[in-house]
Amino acid sequence: MLDTFFNVEIMKAAWPILLAGLGNTLLLSVTVVPLGLLGGLMLALLARLHSPWVRWPLMAWVDFFRAFPPLVLLILLYAGLPFIGIELGGFGCVAIAFFLNTGAYYGEILRAGIDSVPTGQTEAARSTGLSASQTMAWVVLPQAVRNVLPDLMSNTLEVVKLTALGSVVAMPELLFQARQAQSLTYNPTPIVVAALVYFALLWPLVRLLSRLENRALRAG
Amino acid sequence: MIEAIGLHKHFGALHVLKGVDLRVADRELVFVIGPSGSGKSTLLRCLNRLETPDAGSIVVDGIDLMHRRTDLNAARRRIGMVFQGFNLYPHMTALGNVTLALRKVAGKGRAEAEALGLAALERVGLRDRAGHTPGQLSGGQQQRVAIARAIALEPRVMLFDEPTSALDPELVGSVLAVMRELREDGMTMVVVSHEMGFARAAADRVVFMDHGQIVEQGPPAAIFEAPQEARTQAFIGQIQRH
C-alpha cells in the first residue's frame, strides 16, 4: 500500500519534474487571474453604459462564456485555431480560454459589487468635482471590491484549480507533469504528491476565505 | 451669486419642477421649505447639476451650468454640497474624506492637502477625529466631516439637502452650530430643511415650495408668522404642531 501510493524512492525521483509543473501552475495562475480580473473589470464598467448597443452584446458575451464549458473552449482553441493558421501553443490557449471564461465570471461579481455601492457615494464624490472615472477609481471600486471580496476569492480559487485543465493541451503544469511521472514509473505516487501540493497551495486561501465569509456573515 | 430661471424637470411622467425661478444674492442664506415631493431637493440638486433640468438656465458665480462646454467638475469645486445621509466614504478616514478632492481635483500634494484638510476639520471642531473612519463617528460628527469635505475646497456657495433630518435630536445642535459659523463667515447658502428655529435665527429669506412651484417667499418672520397663501398657512401650521 505504502509502496504503491507513498513510494519514497519514486517521490524523490519525481520531485524535480513535479516542481517544474508547480512552477508552471503558478506562472499560469499569476497570468490568468490578473487577466481575468482585467477582463472582468472591463465588462463590469461596460455594463454601466446604458446604451442598448453595448448592453445586449455584452449580456450575450457574458452568458455565452459562462455557459460554455472551459474545457471545451480550451480544446476548441487548441485544436481549432491551427486550421485558420493561428498557433498559440498550450500556454497561449489556456491564457485566452481563461481570460474569456473567468473574465465573464469576474465581470458579474464586480458588477454586483459596483451595484452594491449606494448612489449617494457617487453623488458626494461628483459634488466635490471628481470626474466620473476618478469617482469610480477612488470611491466606488474600493468599496465594490471590499463588498464582494469573498466571491472574488472564491472565483480565484476555482481558477487556480482549473489551471489543471492545461494538462489536456500538453501544457506542462503540475497535473500534466505528475501524469508524465506516473507513466514513467508505473506508480500513482506522483499523482498523490501532486494532489498534496495542490492542497498545500490552496488550503491557506480556503481558510482565509472561510474567515472572510464568517466575518461578512457576522457583519451582515 | 445664483440665478436659476425657468427650471423644469420631469421624472418620467412626473412633473417635479414647473418653472421655478430662484435668485440668491452673495452672502445670502436662503431656506427652502415645503412638503415632501414638492421638488425642493430636486431644485437644490439642479444647482450643481447633480440633476439636469429639462429646461431653464442656471448661472452660479458667473458660470453657466447649462452650457454644454462648461467644465462641470471645475464648477462643482466652487459649489459645496451636504447630503441628508452624509455620504462619507466609509473606506477612508475623516481626513481621507476631506483630502480626496483636494488631491485629485484641486491637484494639491499630499502634505498641503493634509494641512488644508486638518484646517477644515478644525473649523467643524473635529481635528482630533482626523484618523477615525466614518463608522467610528456619531451621526452629528459624520455630518460635520461632510461639511468639512465641502468647505475644504473653498466653495463660493454651499447647498444643504436636509442636513439634520437623519440625526438624533441631541446631535442636531452641533451641525447647526457649524452652519451658523459658516453663515457668520459670509458663506452664501441654500438650505433645504425644516429646522424652523435655525431658519428664524439665521435665514435671510424663506422660500415655500409646493407641487413643483414656489408658492411664496419672504423674510422668515413673514413666512412663519403671517403667511399669505392658504397652502403656506396649512404647511406652516402642520410643521409647527410637531
Image (spheres, coloured by chain):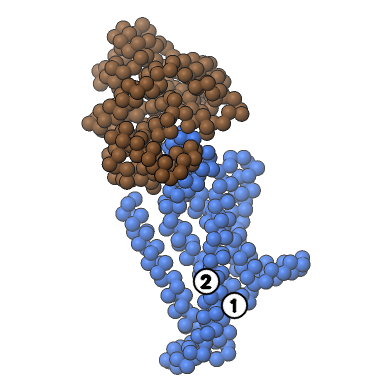
Chain letter corresponding to the colour blue = A
Q: Which residue is mark 2?
A: A26
Q: Quadrant of residue B230?
A: top left
Which residue position is annotated with label 1?
A: A172
Image x and y of residue A27, in percent: 55, 70
Residue drawn at x 36%, y 6% as measured from the top left = B228
- Point out the tag, 1 or 2, that comes first from the N-terminus: 2
The colour chain B appears in is: brown
Figure check: A108 above or below A54: below
| Whole-percent x, y for residue A167 in the image | 59, 76
Q: Is residue A90 left or right of residue B75?
A: right
- Please tell me which residue lies in front, B110 or B176: B110
Whether the residues at callouts 1 and 2 have beta carbons within 8 Å, the answer is no
**In percent of the image, x 42 and y 67: which residue is there?**
A205
Most extreme residue toward the left, as rendered? B170
Along the line of sight, which residue is nearer the eye, B155 or B143? Answer: B155
Kind of residue at badge 2: Leu
